[in-house]
Amino acid sequence: MSDHPDQPVQTMDINQIMSILPHRYPFLLIDRIVEVERRTRIVAIKNVTINEPHFAGHFPDFPIMPGVLIIEAIAQAGAALLLTEFTAAERASKLMVFTSIDDARFRRPVVPGDQLRIEVTVLNWRSNAVKMRGIATVDGKLACEATAMCALTNRKPAKPAAAPSGATAE
């Protein structure tokens, strides 16, 4: 990982991913980045385990990773690619958000024990948005595919909670 946009990006472990993305457990859905072609393509790995909280209800006795979480993993990989173009100081004031999801298809279930390989290819890159095509495979077999668009927005600082009017200190 590089803290300067002009240096090449290397593969990333979980600590480096967490320095790029704001997501945390249980919503950080990529565990490792194994390939990066700057501004072009990224490949990430998600190790699917039974102890993830969504498996308690989706579905008891037949755990399947929810498709929306696979799409989210695709978006997180794409966001990691885009956010590596900014320094740590710049990333601190930015947030990547979905603006569209198109042509999503779910081809096979993803279950605990699977290793999801997420490959995201940039279709269109702008300074504050990226359109990308993502595919997720397990053992070389297509599990999910989608086209997503994400935009870079400014983070708004959290406002302190206001005390209710008429409240007094006890």
Image (spheres, rainbow, N blue to C red):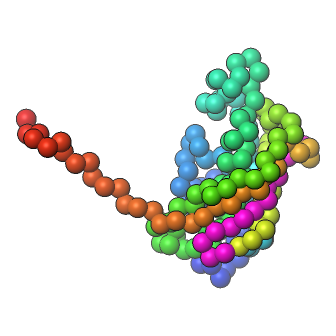
Q: Main secondary structure of the magenta part?
A: strand
* Magenta stretch bounds: 126-139
Residue located farthest toward the right when viewing the structure as drawn: 140
Compare residues 73 and 154 and report the one nearer the observer.
Answer: 154
Q: Is residue 119 left or right of residue 139?
A: left
Residue located farthest toward the bottom when viewing the structure as drawn: 6
Residue 133 on the magenta span: yes
The N terminus, quarter of image: bottom right
**Relative to 128, does residue 31 appear above or below in the rendering?**
above
The C terminus, quarter of image: top left
Q: Find residue 28 and report its horizontal and vertical position in percent.
A: 61, 47
- The residue depicted at 35 percent of the width and 56 percent of the height is 158
Among the 4 quarters of the image, the one containing residue 86: bottom right
Q: Find residue 13 and report its horizontal and vertical position in percent.
A: 67, 56
- The residue depicted at 48 percent of the width and 72 percent of the height is 89
Question: Can you see residue 25?
Answer: yes
Question: Can you see residue 35?
Answer: no
Q: Is residue 92 left or right of residue 59?
A: left
Q: Is residue 86 left or right of residue 130?
A: left
Among the 4 quarters of the image, the one containing residue 139: top right
